[in-house]
Image: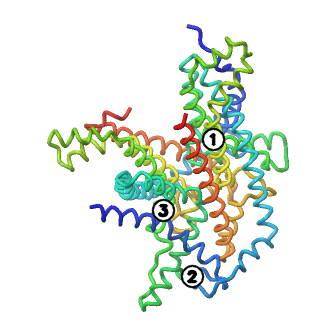
Amino acid sequence: MKKTSIGNPHIATPYVAWSVIFIVVPLLMVGYYSFTDEAGNFTFANISKIIEYNYLKIFGVSILYALVATIITLLISYPLAYFMTKTKLSTQGTLMLLVMLPMWMNLLIRTYSLSNILERNGLINTFLESIGLEKVQLINTPGAVILGMVYNFIPYMILPIYSALSKLDHRLLEASSDLGGNGFTTLKRVIIPLSMPGVISGITMVFVPSVSTFYISQKLGGIRNELIGDVIEQQFKLNSNYNLGASLSLILMVMIIISLMIMNKFTADDDDGGVIV
Amino acid sequence: MKLISKIYIALIIFFLYAPIAVMIFFSFNSSNSTAVFEGFSLRWYTELFANDTVTTALLNTLILAVSSAVIATVLGSFAAVGIHSYRRKWSKGAVMSVTNIPMMNPDIVTGISMMLLFVFFGRMLALRNSLNFITLLIAHVTFNLPYVILSVMPKLRQLDTHLSEAALDLGCTPFKAFFKVILPSISSGIVTGFIMTFTLSLDDFVISYFTTGPDFQTLPLLIYSMTKRRVTPDMYALSTLMFAAVLTLLILFNFAQARATRKKADR
């Protein structure tokens, strides 16, 4: 059958060339810098330095923080998205807008105002003092960093779950209760499995920016809660050690890919998870 | 149950907006504290506009956002049409996988990978400044492109192929058929892509941070350097203005979308 002349495949060529030069080649550059020294000679020194210098511990901490933040975000977002689908249609539109709006606010600003609230002389501590209580250390703690991640990335969790839940076929829920399933069974056997695609994209969209952040940890964690993003940033901006920075980024990339693969495996193994491809 | 869900929704919305509300509130503070309100004043707003660095950065941000959004939209729309007409499944798959990379990769990796490319070629060509406005623009176009392609693609899939065939049968040249038939039907996707890339570009910090040179500063970069110093409410004033701008843009966009759906329903 003759295919229509909707378009000529060749008009995609400029883009293909662009994406090769500015997406593929840069990634190869990361590989190249990872395995060379400053003079451009092949070496494993960068990788072995990472193992020697405790960088692996920072990797571990970053993954741990990001994981905790992702789980908290999921636990908060799921009920919210579910409750949202139960409201009136016009209310749902407004709520969507309210959830999305902070997303369009710069992350720096959001984190910055959060840091001012948590500061030693910030809003919370000023309030505590005014009612005669002692100041508490809020900023520069792991909790503050995780709070920052949750606060900044929670819309990315709410939206995909909400859109998965709002597409749910109500007849399936009725069928479930007709067949004798109580509320909990319906939730476990119908609602959650069917919303899994939304949950997975939410987890990805929260975990990836959390594990690679450097501004949030800088502003809310202080020097004692350094994450891998901070270390990479320092290598490029402070120490000008591009080779070490590149190999740290390479490992970060590989770790993210592995984490996402593990997560996909977990969710695919779920007994009712037939929906996920 | 209903009450609980209402309270829950309200709590989360409060959580989302509390820091923003604090910021807006203290931007009107007459003293330079961001914790104790001492009286209403517009002092920080006037100081902001008197500050050349801020106005330059604002202008830079807009120039960058508009130009990168325009380039990405044109390049991306053509790309979407072209990729859509690829016949081999694997070449389509390969191109789309590459397209997904900037969206899946953490921003810091995208940023440094491009920085390494620019620095590498800068050294090869012995440039004094391998990072500048052009490299920043290239970086923005690159991370914007996938969003254009992914908003145009679904429109192409919905397209009735018989329409362009009919146009050709009725004597249109393929070129004319493209502009008369295809373009109007994918235009909503193109507009969505443009607005999305414009806002992404306005908002980007991480990738810009690694790919810009010393003489081109955007607002997010300025905010970054401002927040490294002591905290003063001028930052809050700037943020409040940006928030108001985003709010207006989003409301306008929503209106436009609501109108488009209504128009569709009428048809």
Viewer-nearest residue: A273 or B179: B179
The residue furthest front is B266
Query: In this rendering, which labeled residue sits more in front, label 1 or label 3?
Result: 1
Q: Disc 1 or disc 2, which is closer to the eye?
A: 1
Q: What secondary structure is marked by label 1?
A: helix
Q: Position of residue B218 (x, y in %)?
A: 73, 58
| Residue tagged 1 | B193
Residue B130 screen position, x and y as percent: 79, 47
Rendered image quadrant of residue B94: top right
Q: Relative to residue A112, is residue B59 depicted above or below?
A: above
Label 2 resides on the chain identified as: B
Estimate the spatial distance between the alpha carbons at disc 3 and disc 2, rounded to whole Å: 20 Å
The relative height of residue A25 versus residue A252 in the rendered view (above or below) is above
Most extreme residue toward the left, as rendered?
A180
- Residue beneath label 3, please? A151
Residues beneath discs 1 and 3 located on the same chain? no
> Which residue lies under the disc numbered 2?
B35
Mark 1 or mark 2: whose residue is earlier in sequence: 2
